[in-house]
Image: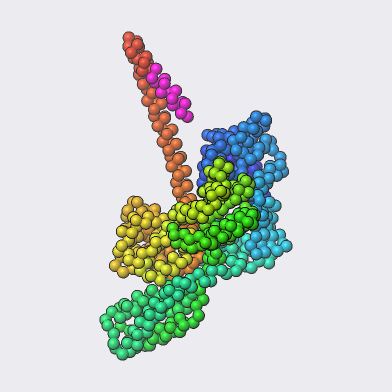
Amino acid sequence: MRILVVEDDPGIAFLLETILATHKYAVDVATDGQAGLDLSDAYEYDAILLDVTLPKKDGISVCREIRAKGNIVPILLLTSLDSAADRTRGLDAGADDYLGKPFDRDELLARLRAILRRSHAPTAPILSWGSLQLDPVSTNVTFGDRLVPVTPKEYALLELFLRNSKRVFSCNAILDHLWSFDTPGEEVIRTHIKGLRHKLKQVGAAADFIETVYGIGYRLKPIESSGAALLTDTWEKFKGQVHEQVAILEQLAVRFFNRDLQSDWQTIGKNIAHSLTGSLGTFGFSLSSELARQIEKLLDSNRDLTPAQGQLLLSLVTALREELDRPIVTTDLHSFAPDLTTDILLVSADKDLNHEIQSMAIDFRSERLRQHGWNVQIVPTIAAARSQLQRERTRSILLTEAAIEQTAAVLGLLVDINKQVPLVPVIALTNPDLLDPVVEHLGNWTSVCPTKIADLMAEIERAIAEAESTQIHVLVVDDDLKILAILRALLLPWGFKITTLADSQKFWKILPMCKPDLLILDVEMPIVSGLDLCKSIRDRAEYANLPIIFLTAHTEPTLIQQVFAIGADDFVTKPVIGPEIIARITNLMERQQVQRLKAAQWQRIDAERVKLATKAKIQAALMAINAAVSADNPLHSRQSRPILDQVDILCQLLLDSD
């Protein structure tokens, strides 16, 4: 768990950091109130230890501002001001607990564990993945019945993986989550991963329990494969076109020996092979993809083929046909494919109400979302809902009056919901006046009175439609319709909004209309290539920060260097692998979000510097006016007095604004 310590006394700050690190907490330290507030805005902490008497902004003010922003992070106030009035003031400001200085080490840890338990209640505290278990309360890590001796950073790394078990984390993403200041290099992450693997192997885990996804990062090795049928529908749609393309290659190979070819036959064959290289591997035909790549290389020449090369072409095309006639084995997407989507996650223990809502959902026809019938998942408790939220993509959550009354549990659920993209709407089956103001402020709420339950499905439809209109919008530009269909099939279940474009000449007409958050470009396209588009995008100031990922079947170092030199943010090779493209998009968007937060902090710092510099200049000017007027001829003192009065007023205003 990650703790923020806000303490201006270097000795106490060092002591707190040492105590917490010894008990496997990841610790960040801020030495003034404003820095602590900025860190709490930029990063997600499990708890904050906050001194009351701080420079720049006192702890009580920091606490109030954190709560005013809807942040429910547990806060433990530390201070030598330990009177009843001081404790009351701190607790009224929103603190969860109060500890006087000097403090006892064991009491500090006990109070910290208590506020952490309250903030995470009523969820099961044990995080597990197969035989691996991590207990956030005792900070013990076990594999089977054996204790795993981990360092604080190894513990934090394991906790990050276990709380986000379906994600691949790049080294940069891990650094952003576990370090704030003095961020080390990526080699430190690799060292920690190596150490963790060694310790896990010693207690019986597989050597690759923490798996490397090459070119992306690290994740927990999936326990079992899922999503095997994700691309079947897309393959059924396009397999006829694929077979037609292979038939053209077969005809070209036969005509080569009959000397019955048009002049550009090699170009036609190369373009077909290039298209097949990118799409076949994603459909599961990895060997077919490699055969298509070999055909492309053979035809990618300015010279006519020799008879021996013609025979090789025929052999490759024949082998390609035979491979495609084998049963399809779809790409293994491991745990990345969200096979199940829950339209409505209903938190209710009322069987009659559950049956009524489920019946309404099955019969509901949504014209707005083009859907007939909702998939409803019913769980009895909020704790079960939080667990379900981690396992399946959830489009909306419906809470009954009984569930909403559990304010602390609802706040914990909302913290989890706020991590979802797009934000999951919450529908409360209650009178709007009964919602707790803090709860209402934190969530994306819709209230439906129990007496108007007939309107419930329409309200859920509206809430889902509004939430999904804020999805991350990805524009994909590729001349291969199969690749466009594959990317749509891969990305839509993950909550992305997808726009596809096959004609790159229409790019500048489409871009301003769809306003994407991220752009995926194919390198090779007729007339206007992806490289040309990227150059023109980066030349326009309004699109300078638009994230761009390139797709290509080629992996030559010179091409990769060229792609990054013209302004690309990332590079994915064809065939497109589901986990890779999803992880790259997620990591890229998250990295951009962190950069925006850091940039906002620097802007605030720069603005404060400008403000201080401006005040200093005004004060200097006023002092000069004062001196000049005071030194004036005594005969004119009656005229200069009003000026001096105005100078005094301005000086007082400057002092009051500090």
Vertical comparison of 197 with 628: above or below = below
Corner quadrant of residue 650: top left
- Residue in view at x 39 percent, y 29 percent: 617
Q: Nearer the viewer, residue 171 or 383?
A: 383
The answer to whether residue 435 of the structure is visible from this angle is: yes
Is residue 300 a member of the stretch shown in magenta?
no
The image position of residue 144, as x and y in percent, is 70, 64
Is residue 647 a member of the stretch shown in magenta?
yes
Q: Residue furthest top?
A: 635
Q: Nearer the viewer, residue 550 or 391?
A: 391
- Residue in view at x 62 percent, y 32 percent: 89
Q: Residue furthest bottom?
A: 258
Corner quadrant of residue 479: bottom left
The image position of residue 47, as x and y in percent, is 61, 45
Q: Is residue 655 left or right of residue 5?
A: left
The image position of residue 335, as x and y in percent, is 56, 65
Vertical comparison of 117 with 161: above or below = above
Which secondary structure type mostly characterizes the magenta part of the structure?
Answer: helix
The answer to whether residue 156 of the structure is visible from this angle is: no
- Residue in view at x 47 percent, y 26 percent: 656
Q: Nearer the viewer, residue 636 or 402?
A: 402
The image position of residue 317, as x and y in percent, is 40, 83
**Which scheme is used to colour this image of the protein?**
rainbow
Corner quadrant of residue 129: bottom right
- Residue in view at x 53 percent, y 39 percent: 68
Q: Residue furthest left?
A: 263
Q: Is residue 229 left or right of residue 635?
A: right
- Count of picture labels: 0
Residue stretch rendered in magenta on the structure: 645-658
